[in-house]
Image (cartoon, rainbow, N blue to C red):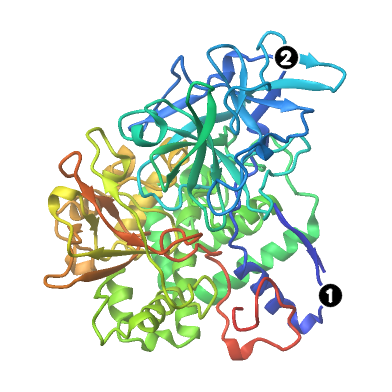
């Protein structure tokens, strides 16, 4: 069997009886950073163009300032800029991509070097024909939106699927020596980052995987000789370059683009995978709920008017049939961890189907391993958040924390950290300006786990902007589904721009689910359906270390506070997504005892899989 995905090609030979197990295992380990296929969104040419000035987001608004950086690269200089004298200084492992920016002097300055000999005039890009050295300049493709996305402090991971990774001249994704993908970042260059970048925006290398995930490394001039010194921002306070196709499909299957429709084998496999999952995990109550939300909204008439499936005859089975008939490349995205899939079938409830299926499969993984017997399971399922005394002997130390993480994830070792647990400080300074994280939002459609530890002293007060969480909003209630369904309707401008839906980010969604929005804000009462008003999470009284485990597919936000004050917290270090690494939300639940001995091992031991 040969299977090809967006970023991997592998071949395994197994007996038919173990095919489903192999597919499940391969799906379960698909946890590396997988961006959308938007490499075409950044074009390279001999001279800058009017599209070379890329928009910059500030307080959620994208503008195109005159000082927006123009990206450039050296073609034919052996891409050896990353090997300059700073090797061994950056993070855990030496790394830098080979892009640069067009300086005010008209020179192309590589990220890994400030000053020196590798410069070129913008109007004269061919500087050494004998070596084939050429400077190229980036511009956004007319069919794409490309912009510098603002990443607030302590946002993990700062790598949304719209993020544009670095692509080398040969068309491969840029990575360091350890195979970890790299992106492009830019420091804010204001008072919030003056300690790191001297108050001037600096282009840098964003690490997308591994122990330095979420860190933006850059260089700054220091001294009269203009040599470079290393700087870094970890977990936010910088911009990341991201892109999206303007086509209705939002990616390689956008309207008018060629897809994978000729790959019949892949399509057949994906269709079976979709139908099997829906049949196994979606309940009759789920089907009725989705039908009710879609019919009440009237959205299905956009697609079904004048057909056999008119608005009065819309059904869940019609949605499933339409989804199963999508092209292979579209089905791949539907069955991925992509937070929002811009597609015409959202009028029939595609977004709701993905969210319901992800929730049911997460529950099934917990049940499959027997973790539903954990004493905190009922509270987790009901509220979506747990608050514990980390030093309480009843918790059981590191092993007790690990058991808690196994229960909330449904995994025994996959994505689970190893003992002894270590914690790293992640401090948040209350900003004087608008911090996008202070807006109530959900992170994604599927259950995900984030973890914080708050220590007292110094403690956390209301002045320091504590985390707010609305209990019960991680569940797919009818009110939440109404809100998400309206949010997902074409043109879905807000959802395409920020797939982490903001509570009041879409006027149509607020109108369609006003009861849900007001309940989160404490202005309406939906406690009878399990939804509580968002409340601050302050350290437990008299407790030295408070552990918070939250499913941030529920509505949450960073509280406002007194500008300049700092909220201190501790997080799990490394490539953890702020808690537990995000895995494929549609991976099959597997009991360890059920895995056949002949299943090939992928990326780990049998116990891990």
In the picture, measured across the screen, residue 153 lies left or right of residue 391, that is: right
Compared to residue 316, the image places residue 79 above or below, namely above
The disc placed on residue 505 is none
Sequence-wise first label, 1 or 2: 1
The disc placed on residue 125 is 2
Res 71 → quadrant = top right
Q: Which residue is mark 1?
A: 13
Which residue appears at 18% of the width and 59% of the height? 458
Q: Position of residue 36 (x, y in %)?
A: 61, 45
Instruction: Using the numbered discs, state the Cα–Cα distance from disc 1 to disc 2 in whole angstroms.
Output: 51 Å
| Residue farthest bottom in this picture | 593
Q: Within 10 Å of the Cα at label 2, are there few (<14), some (14-19), or many (20+) other Cα atoms?
A: many
In the picture, measured across the screen, residue 209 lies left or right of residue 392, that is: right
In the picture, measured across the screen, residue 437 lies left or right of residue 156, that is: left
Which residue appears at 76% of the width and 27% of the height? 75
Quadrant in the picture for the N terminus? bottom right
Which secondary structure, mark 2?
loop
Compared to residue 279, the image places residue 372 above or below, namely below
């Amino acid at each position: 069997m040969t299977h090809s995905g967006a970023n991997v090609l592998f071949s395994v030979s197994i007996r038919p009886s173990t095919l489903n197990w192999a597919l499940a295992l391969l799906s379960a380990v698909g946890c590396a950073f997988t961006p959308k296929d938007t490499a075409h969104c950044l074009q390279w040419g001999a001279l800058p163009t009017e599209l070379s000035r890329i928009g910059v987001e500030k307080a959620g608004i994208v503008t195109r300032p005159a000082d927006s950086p123009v990206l450039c690269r050296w073609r034919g200089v052996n891409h050896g800029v990353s090997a300059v004298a700073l090797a061994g200084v950056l993070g855990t492992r030496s790394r830098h991509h080979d892009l640069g920016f067009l300086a005010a002097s008209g020179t192309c300055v590589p990220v890994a070097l400030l000053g020196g000999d590798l410069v070129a005039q913008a109007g004269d890009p061919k500087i050494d024909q004998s070596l084939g050295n050429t400077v190229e300049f980036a511009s956004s493709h007319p069919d794409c939106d490309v912009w510098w996305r603002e990443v607030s402090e302590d946002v993990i991971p700062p790598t949304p699927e719209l993020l544009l990774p670095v692509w080398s001249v040969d068309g491969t994704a840029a990575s360091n020596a350890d195979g970890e993908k790299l992106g492009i970042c830019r420091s804010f260059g204001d008072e919030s980052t003056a300690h790191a970048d001297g108050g001037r925006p600096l282009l840098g290398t964003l690490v997308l995987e591994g122990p330095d995930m979420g860190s933006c490394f850059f260089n700054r001039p220091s001294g009269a000789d203009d040599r470079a010194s290393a700087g870094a921002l970890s977990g936010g306070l910088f911009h990341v370059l991201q892109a999206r196709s303007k086509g209705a499909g939002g990616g390689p299957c956008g309207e008018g683009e060629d897809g994978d429709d000729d790959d019949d084998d892949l399509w057949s496999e994906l269709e079976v995978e979709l139908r099997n999952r829906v049949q196994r995990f979606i309940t009759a109550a789920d089907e009725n709920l989705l039908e009710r939300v879609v019919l009440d909204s009237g959205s299905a008439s956009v697609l079904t008017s004048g057909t056999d499936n008119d608005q009065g005859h819309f059904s869940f089975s019609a949605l499933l049939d339409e989804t199963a008939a999508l092209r292979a490349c579209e089905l791949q995205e539907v069955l991925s961890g992509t937070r929002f899939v811009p597609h015409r079938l959202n009028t029939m409830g595609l977004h709701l189907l993905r969210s319901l299926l992800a929730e049911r499969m997460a529950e099934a993984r917990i049940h499959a391993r027997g973790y539903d017997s954990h004493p905190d399971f009922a509270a987790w399922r009901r509220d979506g958040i747990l608050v514990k005394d980390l030093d309480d002997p009843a918790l059981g130390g590191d092993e007790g924390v690990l058991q808690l993480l196994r229960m909330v994830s449904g995994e025994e070792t996959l994505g689970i950290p190893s003992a002894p647990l270590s914690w790293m400080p992640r401090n948040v300074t209350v900003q004087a300006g608008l911090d996008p994280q202070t807006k109530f939002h959900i992170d994604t459609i599927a259950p995900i786990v984030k973890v914080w530890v708050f220590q007292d002293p110094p403690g956390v007060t209301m002045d320091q902007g504590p985390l707010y969480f609305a209990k019960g909003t991680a569940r797919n209630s009818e009110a939440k589904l109404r809100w998400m369904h309206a949010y997902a309707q074409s043109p879905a401008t807000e959802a395409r721009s920020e797939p982490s839906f903001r509570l009041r980010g879409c006027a149509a969604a607020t109108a369609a689910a006003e009861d849900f929005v007001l309940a989160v804000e404490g202005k309406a009462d939906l406690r009878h359906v399990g939804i509580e008003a968002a409340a601050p999470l302050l350290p437990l009284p008299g407790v030295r270390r408070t552990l918070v485990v939250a499913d941030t597919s529920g509505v949450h936000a960073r509280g406002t506070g007194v500008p300049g004050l700092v909220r201190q917290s501790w997080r799990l270090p490394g490539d953890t997504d702020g808690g537990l690494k995000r895995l494929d939300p549609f991976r099959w639940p597997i009991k360890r005892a059920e895995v056949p001995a002949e299943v090939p091992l992928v990326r780990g031991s049998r116990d891990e899989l």
